[in-house]
Image (cartoon, grey):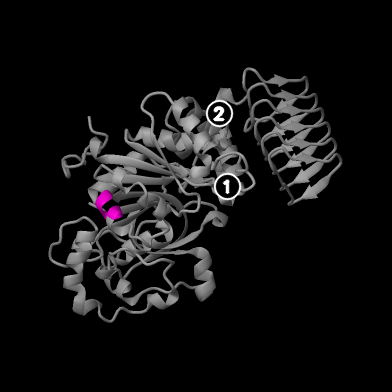
Amino acid sequence: MSMFSLNVASRNPQMDMSELQAVILAGPGKSLSPLTQGTPKALLPIAGKPMISYSLQWIESAGIKDVLIVAAQSHGDQLTTYVRSLEGRRPELVLVDDHLGSGAALRKVLDKLRQTNVVVMSVDTIPADSPMVLLDQFRTHNAAMLALYYGAAPDAAADQVIGLAPLNPVRDRTSVAPATGVARLVAASLRAKVTEASGPGMPLRLDMLREFPTVRMVRAQDAHLYIFRTETLRSMLGDKAGSIQRETVPALIKSQYVPSAAKSPSPGTVSPDDMDVDHDHDRHADAANQASMAIAGLTPSNGTLQSRPMILAYLSQAGADASSSSVGGSSMDLATTTAAASGAPLHAQLAAIGHPGARANTPTGYAELNRTLAKLAGEHRVAATADLAPRTQVGPESMVGDQTRVGERSSVKKSVVGARCVIGRNVKLVNCVLMDGVAIDDEVKLESCIVCPLAQVGEKCTLKDSIVAAKMVVPRETTAKNELFS
C-alpha cells in the first residue's frame, strides 16, 4: 500500500515510494559551541539518544529508504562508526569540507540524487508534524518546493518573517491564508535583517502584491526542512548558491511573481533595494515564464500565475491549539502519559502534548528539546542500572542514564542526566542537561546549566544559566551566572 493514503493516489498516481529520497545535513555545529568540542553535532545526546537518531526516525516513519547523510569532514570517523552500528538498511555517509554552506554541501551530492523528489533536513530539527502530511500536501498541489515552519514556536525562537497567501489567489482574491497548515509562500526574510533594514516594517515587492493581494505576515521558526522536486533543486544550486535558506529559497519564492528569478541565485541575501518594483515584469512575463517553469521542473503552459512554480509553506499545526492546561495542568500530564505509552512515532507524541517541534541549533534550543523529550520517556526515565541513594528525588520530567550514581538528599528536577555520571550528596539540579561522565561534587546547585562530557563541578558551587565545556573543572565554591567555562 502506498504511504500516501488520504485519497491522494487517485488524484496524482505518478508518485510512489521509490520516487522519494532524503538528505540529512549534519554540519559542524558552530552555533552549538562549546557543546560540539569533541562531539559532532549529529551525535550530541538529546534525552539519551544521538541527535541524528531523531532525524532518521522521522524519515523512516515516512517509509523513505534512500537516505544520505552529508557531514563535516572533521567528524568523519565518529559518524562512520555510528552509521556502521545501525541495524537494517544503513544511510550513505558523504563527507564534505567543514566550511561549506548548505547549498554548497548539497552540490557535492547532486550526482547521488537519484529520485524524483527529495526531502532535505537539518540534523538539528525535530518536527512534530507527520512526514506523510507534508508529502501529501507537496504532491497534491504539484509543488516545486515545500518548507516547514514552526509557527507556534516561542517568540525568541522565531527567526523568520514570512508572507503567506492563499493557494489559489486568482480565485480567492480576498481570502487570507490559514494560520496553520499549508499556504503559498510568497515572502521570507531573516527577522534580524527585517529589523536592520526597515525597523518594525518589512518591504514587500509591488509585483508580488499584484499577484497576491492578501498576504498574512507571520513570525515563525524556519525548521530547515524542505521537500524539493529534485530537478528544481538541481537547477537552483548553481555555482554561487551557498545557502538554501538565504539564496535558494528566496529565488524560488520570487519566481512565483517574477518568473525570470527562477535561475541559479546570486550569492548573499536579497537586499531592500531588490524589493523595488520590477518594471519589466509585465513586458517579459510570458517568455520568462517558460524559462522559469523549465527550471522548476514543471511543464510550461499558458504563462499565467497558475502555471508558475508552486512554492509552499507548511506552518506546523502541532501546538497551535494548546490550551492553558499545557503549563503544568492535569490534562497536559494525561496527554504526556498517554503519548509516551502509545508507542506512536515521536512526531505524534510531540503533537499529543501540544509541542510544535523545534530545533536544537543553539545551546538554549538544545537544552529545551532535552527537557521536552524527557517528558515522553515514561517508565524509562530512570535507567535500570542507575543507583539512587535514599531520599533522592527525581522529578517526573527528568531522566537519569545508565550507571549513574546520585547521592543522598539530592534532587533532579526538569533535568536530563547522562550515563556514568557521579552526583554527590545534597545536590540540586533544576532545568539542567548533564552529558555522559560528568562529576558533580557535594552541595552543588545548578540551574539552567549544560555540563558537557567528563566535566567536573567542585563542591559547594552555585551556577546558573552557564555552560561547562567538555573535561573542564570548575573550582569548588565557584558562584557564577551566564558564564562559559571552557
Q: Earlier in the sequence, mark 2 or mark 1?
A: 1
Q: Does dot 2 land on a helix, a strand or a loop? A: loop
Q: In screen coordinates, is 78 left or right of 264?
A: right
Could you tell me which residue is drawn at 78 percent across and 37 percent down? 457
Residue under the image location 74 percent in, 50 percent down: 483
Residue 125 visible in the current orientation: no
Quadrant housing residue 156: bottom right
Q: Which residue is mark 2?
A: 377
Q: Quadrant of residue 470?
A: top right
Residue 436 vs residue 396, the one in the foreground:
436
Can you name the residue that lies furthest to the top here?
385
Q: Which residue is mark 1?
A: 365
9 or 225, which is in the foreground? 225
Residue 432 in the image: above or below residue 86? below
Q: Is residue 325 above or below residue 404?
A: below
The magenta-colored residue range is: 230-234
Mark-to-mark CA distance, 2 and 1: 19 Å
Residue 223, labelled with which disc? none
Asked whether residue 231 is drawn in magenta, I would say yes
Q: Residue 10 location, x and y as percent?
A: 16, 40
Amino acid residing under circle 1? Gly
Residue 89 as seen in the image, left or right of residue 390: left
Q: Residue at x 42, y 59 (%)?
A: 242
In percent of the image, x 36 and y 60: which residue is there? 248
Q: SS at mark 1?
A: helix
Looking at the rendered image, the quarter that the N terminus falls into is top left
Residue 349 x %, y %: 46, 34
In this rendering, does residue 466 appear at all?
yes
Q: What x and y, as percent, mark residue 285?
A: 20, 73
The type of residue carrying mark 2 is: Ala
- Tell me where residue 25 appears, x and y as whole percent: 44, 45
Bin the neighbour count of mark 1 within 10 Å (Cα to Cα): few under 14, some 14-19, many 20 and up: some
